[in-house]
Amino acid sequence: MQYDDSLSESYRRFLAGDESAAREVMDGLFLGLVRFIAGYVRDMPSAEDIAMDVMAELFAKRRGYEPRSKLKTYAYMRGKCLALDLLRHRKALAFDGLDACGDLPDGRAELDAELLKTERERELSKALDLLPADMRAAVRLVYFEGMSYEEAARVLKKTRKQTDNLLYRAKLKLREILGEEGRDLI
């Protein structure tokens, strides 16, 4: 089965000699891949290094990806493997966190709204960190990266039903952690 999606198509164009398609693939994959890997290694510089290794395999070595699945699914699977390899060779790493603030607007109302949003994201991020790794990964893949349950199952090397169960249990656990105030975050 061959999947047609924009990233896979851009990668095929890159392999056919269209160097500009490489930027499309990088823009579409890199940041999400880094965030996903950071959920495993809990260290942003290491996550960026691993994501760059995945990109190097795709662009410099031009190997690994077969168009039987989406390029994004392949990249996340490869990133997970490299992250787990790193964890096997290191002690648990400290998580620096994501820079959720960015540039804040000048207006007071917009500033308050942005601060509230940032605080909610921080609460959700802390709650996600309390989940077991497999639940955390499933939530990030489906809800933050927009993968289907089937794609997430491939990345996690689980069945669709196991992924569904992980997400169900993760939502229950998040509701328990966040309490009534966090219901709108889930």
Image (spheres, rainbow, N blue to C red):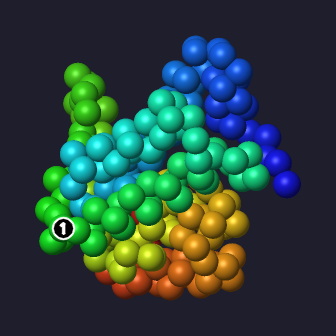
Question: Can the viewer see residue 115?
Answer: no
Please name the residue shown 82% across and 48% down the image: 2
Counting from the top left corner in percent of width and height, residue 6 is at 70, 33
Residue under circle 1? Answer: 90
50 or 151, nearer to the observer: 50
> Dot 1, how many residues are within 10 Å of its Cα: few (below 14), some (14-19), or many (20+)?
few
Total numbered circles: 1
Q: Please tell me in which quadrant of the rendered image residue 43 appears.
A: bottom left
Vertical relation: 184 (above or below) 119 = below
- Left or right for 98, reference 172: left
- Left or right for 108, reference 158: left
Vertical relation: 163 (above or below) 37 = below
Counting from the top left corner in percent of width and height, residue 158 is at 60, 78
- Left or right for 108, reference 13: left
Q: Please tell me in which quadrant of the rendered image residue 130 appears.
A: bottom left
- Left or right for 168, reference 84: right
Q: Amino acid at mark 1?
A: Arg
Counting from the top left corner in percent of width and height, residue 71 is at 63, 44
102 or 50, nearer to the observer: 50
Where does the N terminus fall, quadrant-wise?
bottom right
106 or 163, nearer to the observer: 163
Please name the residue shown 45% across and 44% down the image: 54
Please name the residue shown 55% across and 76% down the image: 167
Question: Can the viewer see residue 93?
Answer: yes
Vertical relation: 160 (above or below) 36 = below
Please name the residue shown 15% across and 71% down the image: 91
Q: Give the SS element for disc 1.
A: loop
178 or 46, nearer to the observer: 46
